[in-house]
Image: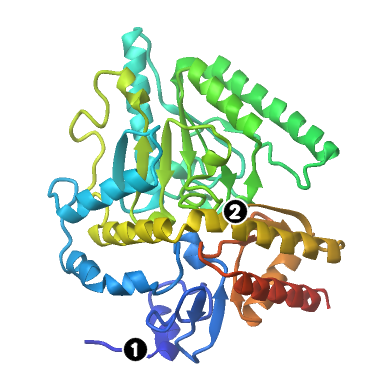
């Protein structure tokens, strides 16, 4: 068996792949809690990005270590979950619905990869809308309304939606010309001036949607939105706007899809970000922290006699999700519930936001638009070049964090991060701002 030392990893990987990722080579055995250990030199980094928001409770949680044999059993063989069933699969699905999935939803589809979860939600919407149209002797059902600065993945359908600030994600790839709507992102603090601006943007966006419906009519199958746009720049939306989307979708027989791949599993202080607004979608896509990806759907699908959960082979994949991921999700769900980590994320998020607002007040010439829901927090810097410089300094000073949009710094810590660790992260941010400013 080939063995490669941490110091040689980048050299060997670089022979065959683009190695433009972070510098540390993660030591999977020694990393712990909120701390990522670099296998090259043992240096510890405070992890404020958690593998692009995909690790819910940090590294090597004691409960995971206790369940190593259970994980190994699932990993030794890889059953095709779409047609071969196991007790592990059933236990995962039951735990998922009893712990984290609201009563609004009835159906579930598992697949590997968040983009493919969204992809299949779109297919379910197309199928539903075409059948709805057929009932009234209408045709169509092939268009998806989406929003500027959204990121829904890089797969076949989803790449026609994604349009963040980095054009390299979509350049030169053929895409569908689906309706794209301006995003009425909230500017913080939400004072009277910013509220009036946001309301104006919301009115314009609603008008764009109504004009789109007038133009395309029954050809619109779905409207999809991230409750908070992550990759696009940590853009928040008001409850009133999401309610308007719900009303439009009800009146126009359009499936409302919330992409909760990044926002879900407790990060915003609720299991799902939409629960902060009380506006339930017809379909909800999940991934990242859930390990196994996919979507859940409400009984609205039952408005047609046949749909993708009643007719075989309409949506499927060989693996139907990864069984090891399902076991890990089951363990994570139990940990989050037992340790009350959703409520803890809400409380810790308030603590983090207080710290970011203090930094914003101290660095008024640099930091603006501090915002957050639970631990999903962010702030803006004046330019992309300064933002990138600050990100580099943060890593050099001992934390790993991400940017989003053009000039945003985003926080994606584990749900069980401590206040001491938050303080450490804020201290690193302040030091890095000082150094970047020179």
- Spatial CA span between label 1 and label 2: 40 Å
How far across and down, in percent of the image, does residue 367 sit? 79, 61
Q: What element carries label 2?
A: loop
Mark 2 surroundings: few (<14), some (14-19) or many (≥20) residues within 10 A: many
Residue at image location 60% in from the left, 73% down from the top? 421
Residue at image location 77% in from the left, 59% down from the top? 357
How far across and down, in percent of the image, does residue 222 sit? 46, 28
Would residue 296 be seen by someone viewing this image from the given angle?
yes
Q: Is mark 1 on a helix, strand or loop?
A: loop
Specify the color scheme: rainbow
Q: Foreground residue, 348 or 255?
A: 348
Mark 1 surroundings: few (<14), some (14-19) or many (≥20) residues within 10 A: few
Question: Circle 1 sits on which residue?
Answer: 4
Q: Foreground residue, 353 or 410?
A: 353
Q: Foreground residue, 172 or 1?
A: 1
Q: Which of marks 1 and 2 is nearer the N terminus?
A: 1
Name the quadrant containing residue 39: bottom left
| Residue 291 position (above or below residue 45) | above
Residue at image location 32% in from the left, 33% down from the top? 106
How far across and down, in percent of the image, does residue 381 sit? 76, 61
How far across and down, in percent of the image, does residue 174 sit? 46, 42
Q: Which residue lies furthest to the left in this view?
A: 84
> Looking at the rendering, in which quadrant would you find the C terminus?
bottom right
Q: Foreground residue, 360 or 252?
A: 360
Name the quadrant containing residue 54: bottom left
Q: Judge left or right: residue 432 versus residue 349.
A: right
Q: Which residue lies furthest to the top in this view?
A: 137
Would residue 156 be seen by someone viewing this image from the given angle?
no
Question: Circle 2 sits on which residue?
Answer: 374
């Amino acid at each position: 068996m080939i063995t490669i030392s941490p110091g040689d990893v980048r050299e060997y990987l670089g022979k065959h792949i683009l190695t433009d990722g972070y510098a540390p080579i993660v030591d999977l055995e020694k990393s712990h809690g909120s701390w990522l250990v670099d296998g090259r030199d043992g240096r510890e980094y405070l992890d404020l990005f958690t593998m692009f928001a995909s690790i819910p409770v940090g590294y090597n949680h004691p409960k995971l270590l206790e369940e190593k044999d259970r994980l190994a059993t699932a990993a030794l063989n890889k059953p095709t979950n779409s047609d071969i069933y196991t007790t592990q699969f059933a236990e995962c699905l039951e735990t998922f619905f009893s712990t984290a999935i609201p009563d609004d939803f009835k159906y579930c589809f598992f697949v590997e990869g968040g983009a493919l979860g969204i992809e299949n939600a779109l297919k379910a919407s197309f199928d539903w809308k075409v059948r709805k149209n057929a009932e009234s002797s209408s045709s169509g059902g092939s268009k998806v309304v989406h929003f500027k600065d959204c990121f829904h993945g890089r797969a076949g359908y989803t790449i026609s939606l994604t349009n963040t600030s980095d054009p390299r994600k979509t350049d030169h790839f053929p895409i569908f010309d689906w309706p794209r709507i301006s995003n009425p992102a909230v500017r913080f603090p939400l004072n009277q001036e910013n509220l009036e601006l946001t309301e104006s943007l919301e009115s314009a966006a609603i008008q764009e949607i109504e004009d789109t419906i007038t133009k395309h009519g029954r050809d619109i199958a779905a409207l999809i939105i991230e409750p908070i746009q992550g990759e696009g720049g940590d853009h928040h939306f008001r409850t009133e706007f999401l309610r308007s989307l719900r009303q439009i979708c009800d009146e126009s027989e359009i499936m409302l899809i919330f992409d909760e791949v990044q926002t879900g599993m407790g990060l915003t202080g609720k299991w799902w970000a939409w629960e902060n607004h009380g506006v339930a979608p017809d379909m909800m896509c999940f991934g990242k922290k859930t390990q196994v990806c996919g979507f859940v759907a409400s009984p609205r699908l039952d408005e047609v006699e046949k749909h993708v959960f009643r007719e075989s082979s309409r949506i499927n994949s060989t693996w139907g999700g990864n069984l090891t991921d399902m076991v890990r999700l089951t363990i994570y769900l139990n940990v989050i519930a037992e340790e009350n980590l959703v409520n803890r994320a809400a409380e810790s998020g308030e603590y983090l936001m207080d710290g970011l607002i203090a930094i914003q007040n101290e660095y008024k010439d640099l930091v603006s638009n501090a915002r957050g829901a639970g631990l999903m927090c962010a702030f803006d810097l004046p330019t992309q070049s300064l933002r990138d410089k600050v990100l580099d300094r943060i890593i050099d000073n001992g934390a790993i964090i991400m940017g989003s949009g053009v000039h945003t710094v985003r926080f994606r810590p584990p749900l069980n991060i401590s206040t001491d660790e938050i303080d450490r992260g804020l201290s690193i941010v302040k030091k890095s701002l000082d150094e970047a400013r020179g």
